[in-house]
């Protein structure tokens, strides 16, 4: 029999045991197919045996749980047309999932929702602390210090939880510095260094790491901006200022290696840089010019002559000159007078 035929027997059969058997078979088919809408419909159908309706409801809870349909489970738990047992089962399953996933915010919401059974609200309230403490552990390990700041300021959480979050902010922030550095997310380091909700120690560590990396990369322009940013700790600004020259020299080295003469031209004209740096950029640029000239057959001449460059005479030119030299010379005109 198909599901429609099974439901027909379950509703209108004369034999009670046959009705239950047909109904339970229909529940099994819906469960296997993941057809929770069908199970919900069966759970509401008063023409079905009570045992069948109860089984359909509980199976719907199982499917919602397996598929992570937390909102549907909460709606079931709020539905006062369902038996208290089913409503409680749906709500308790959500609490179990939220607690396991350290979703303390969801538990806070459930504990305040008067549409939920009292047993469910009480259970949610009792699980908030454990879920929040687990969240603190996860956030600390992942370097999510901003989430810890939010927990420490959340007055809906127990004082014990807020204090634990506050005590872990620095450790999480140091982990964040490590992660940002590894992933090359230097904007994150700068944002941390500007964040006055963090300790001075953390802010300086984030900023100094940025200065260190940008110096090694030759990003002297970034260091100039850092040195002028008053949102950053003084120690960081001073370090950036002191490293501009070293970063600029590194940039010259990189630009020279890559033949990026346009950047060297720009540096040689940048009045924000020291004379020493601008001169070094000019010298590096001159080397590139000489290399290009040599590669193109151009040769440095006596700097006192012309522009200091001359063109090597070609073989064809020399051969023509030699041939011309070999041509017979016309005799000088004689005075016929």
Image (cartoon, grey):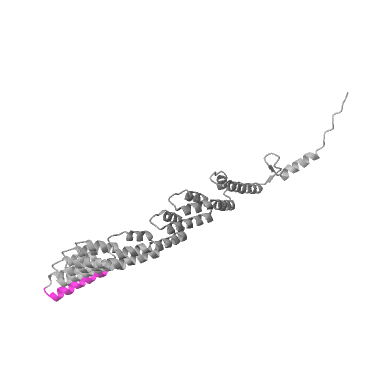
| Along the viewing direction, whichever of 261 and 239 lies nearer the viewer | 239
Residue interval drawn in magenta: 14-35
User: Residue 326: x, y in percent?
Assistant: 80, 40
Asked if residue 103 shows in the view, the reply is: no
Query: Which residue lies at the image location 14% right of the left edge and 76% below the top edge?
Result: 17
| Along the viewing direction, whichever of 43 and 216 lies nearer the viewer | 216
- The prevailing secondary structure element of the residues shown in magenta is helix
| Along the viewing direction, whichever of 302 and 38 lies nearer the viewer | 302
On the rendered image, what quadrant is the C terminus found in? top right
Asked if residue 95 shows in the view, the reply is: yes
Outermost residue to the left: 14
Query: Which residue lies at the image location 73% right of the left edge and 42% below the top edge?
Result: 317
Left or right side of 312 for 65: left
Q: Is residue 104 magenta?
A: no
Q: Is residue 105 above or below residue 258?
A: below
| Along the viewing direction, whichever of 40 and 110 lies nearer the viewer | 110
Outermost residue to the right: 337
User: Residue 195: x, y in percent?
Assistant: 40, 54
């Amino acid at each position: 029999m198909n599901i429609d035929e099974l439901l027909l027997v379950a509703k209108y059969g004369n034999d009670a045991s046959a009705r239950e058997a047909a109904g339970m078979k229909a529940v099994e088919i819906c469960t296997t197919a993941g057809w929770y809408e069908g199970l919900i419909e069966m759970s509401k159908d008063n023409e079905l045996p009570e045992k069948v309706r109860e089984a359909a409801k509980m199976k719907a809870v199982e499917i919602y749980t397996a598929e992570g349909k937390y909102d549907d489970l909460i709606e079931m738990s709020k539905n006062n047309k369902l038996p208290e047992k089913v409503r409680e089962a749906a709500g308790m399953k959500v609490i179990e999932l939220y607690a396991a996933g350290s979703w303390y915010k969801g538990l806070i919401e459930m504990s305040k929702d008067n549409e939920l059974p009292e047993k469910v609200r009480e259970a949610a309230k009792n699980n908030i602390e454990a879920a929040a403490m687990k969240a603190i552990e996860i956030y600390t390990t992942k370097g999510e210090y901003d989430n810890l700041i939010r927990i420490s300021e959340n007055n809906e959480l127990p004082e014990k939880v807020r204090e634990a979050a506050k005590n872990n902010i620095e450790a999480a922030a140091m982990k964040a510095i490590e992660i940002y550095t590894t992933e090359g997310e230097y904007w994150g380091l700068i944002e941390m260094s500007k964040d006055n909700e963090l300790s001075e120690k953390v802010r300086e560590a984030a900023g100094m790491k940025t200065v260190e990396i940008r110096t090694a990369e030759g990003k002297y322009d970034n260091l100039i901006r850092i040195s002028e940013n008053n949102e950053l700790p003084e120690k960081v600004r001073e370090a950036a200022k002191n490293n501009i020259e070293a970063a600029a020299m590194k940039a010259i080295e990189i630009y020279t290696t890559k033949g990026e003469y346009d950047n060297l031209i720009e540096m040689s004209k940048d009045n924000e840089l020291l004379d020493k740096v601008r001169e070094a950029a000019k010298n590096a640029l001159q080397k590139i010019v000489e290399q290009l000239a040599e590669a193109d057959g151009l040769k440095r001449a006596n700097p006192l002559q012309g522009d200091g460059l001359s063109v090597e005479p070609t073989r064809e030119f020399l051969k023509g000159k030699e041939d011309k030299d070999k041509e017979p010379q016309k005799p000088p005109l004689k005075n016929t007078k």
